[in-house]
Image: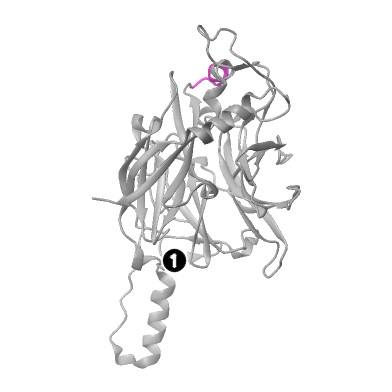
Amino acid sequence: MATRGRWGLVAPRGGAAHRRCPAPLWGLLLALVCGLVVFVALPDREGDSRCAARTVTSASPDTALTTTFARYGDDPTRTDDWTGGDGTHSVRLPDGRTLWLFSDTYTGAVHPPPNPEGQPHAWRDPSAPFVRNSAVLMDRSGRIERTVAAPLFPDTGVGEWRWPVAARVEARAPGSDEQVVRVLLWTRAAGSGPYIYGVPTATEVATLALPSLRVEGITQVLDQRQVRDPAKRVLFGTTLVDGGGWTYVFGGDDGQAPVHRAFVARVPRGRLGDVKAWEYWDGARWQAGARAAPVLGDGRRRGVGSAFGVVRDGGTYVLFTMAAGTAGLTKVVSYWACSPAGPWHGPAKAFTAALPDGTVAAYNPQAHPAMSGDGRFVLSYDVNWLDATPATAQAHLSRNVSLYRPRFVTVRLGPRT
C-alpha cells in the first residue's frame, strides 16, 4: 500500500544571512575578509538578475501521456510487468530513452471490465503481486517498451525497503567519458500508528550501469536512525534541480502536522554519488555534515507534502506541492524563490488535479524535464484511494486499476500579479 501520508504541506522560510562589516578603518585586508564571510554566508544567488515572481497561468491535462501508462498497465501480454504504481519520477537517458521510476508497485494480470455498464473499470486480483519499487523504460517515440525490473532495488536485508525518487545521468567519475545513472533512494522500515506506511531511516544513492541499467551499487548518504523522533527525520531526493555549477537536492521531514517542512542540500554537478561532496543549508550557510534547517514550512498553512517537485524557470525556482488542509487532497499550489535556500514566497493558486470519482486523493506532484519544453512543464501526480485502513484501500485499488497510476498535466508559468 502506498498512501504514505503525502497529503500534507509545508511553508516558506529561510533567507539570506546578513552580516554587517566594520567601517573600512581596518584596511583593505579586513574588508576582503569581511567580503569573504558575506560570500560564504549567503545562499546561492546566481539567478537573481533574472528572478521574478512566477505562478501557474494555465494547466491542462496531458491525456496522451496518461493514456500511455494506462494502456501499458492494461496490456495482458505479460503478467510480470507494471500494472500500477506511485512515486512517479523520470530521467532521460543518453540514447534518448526515458527511464521511469516508481515506488510501491502492482504487477500481475489486469482483467477487462466484466460489465462495462455496471462495472466499467479494468480490475486486478486482490492477490496480485505487490513490490516496493519498479522501473519502466520508454523509447524515444514515447512508447513504453518494457518493465526493467520489479523490484529494481532490493530490500536492505534489515527489515527496510527502498523507494526510488529523483535521478540524474552523470559521468562515472569527474572527467570520465563513461556515464551512469544515479538514483536517490529513500529507505523505510515497518512501523505502526501514524507510520503504518513506514518509518523513514536513510537517504541513499544507487548507481545504474548504462545501457544495461544494472544496479552496480548503493551508497548511504544520510543516516537518520539516530534521530529519535521519526517526525524530525529528513529524507532527501524528492526532486533535483540544477543551478549554476550545483545540483540542488530537496527533501522533506516526516512530521504528522497538516504540512511538512522542506529542506535542501547541494552537490557539485556530476557528484551525486560522492557522499563527501554533499552540503546542507543550515539556515545561514552551506555546510558538510551539518544538520539541515527548513527552508519552507510552518506546520500549519504554508509548506509542502512529504513529496514535491521543483523546476527552474529562468532565474526563478518554482516549487509545486499539494495544498494544506482538505484542499490538499485535490489542489496543487506553488511557491517561488530566487534561491533554493529561499526565502520562498507563496502559496500561489495553481490548479485542481483531475481525479476519478470516489474517495480519492492526489499527491506527489513531480516535474518531468524530458517531457517538458517550449515554456511548458509536464507534471505528474499520483492518485490513491483515501482510507485509513490499508485493506480497504487495497480492495478499491484492485477493483479499479486506474486509481493507482500517474496522471499528467501540462502547466505554463507567468508573472504573478
Residue at 57% from the left image edge and 37% from the top image edge:
199
Decide whether the magenta segment is chiefly helix, strand or loop: helix
Magenta highlight on residue 408? no
In this orientation, which residue lies closer to the viewer: 399 or 187? 399
Vertical order, 147 against 177 (above or below): above
Whole-percent x and y of residue 216?
76, 51
Vertical order, 140 against 269 (above or below): above
Q: At label 1, which amino acid type do we have?
A: Arg
Quarter of the N terminus within the rendering: top right
Residue position for label 1: 285
Residue at 71% from the left image edge and 67% from the top image edge:
176
Residue at 49% from the left image edge and 41% from the top image edge:
254
Q: What stretch is highlighted in magenta?
A: 388-395
Res 80 → quadrant: top right
Relative side of 407 to 314, left or right: right
In this orientation, which residue lies closer to the viewer: 306 or 210? 210
Q: Residue furthest front?
A: 141
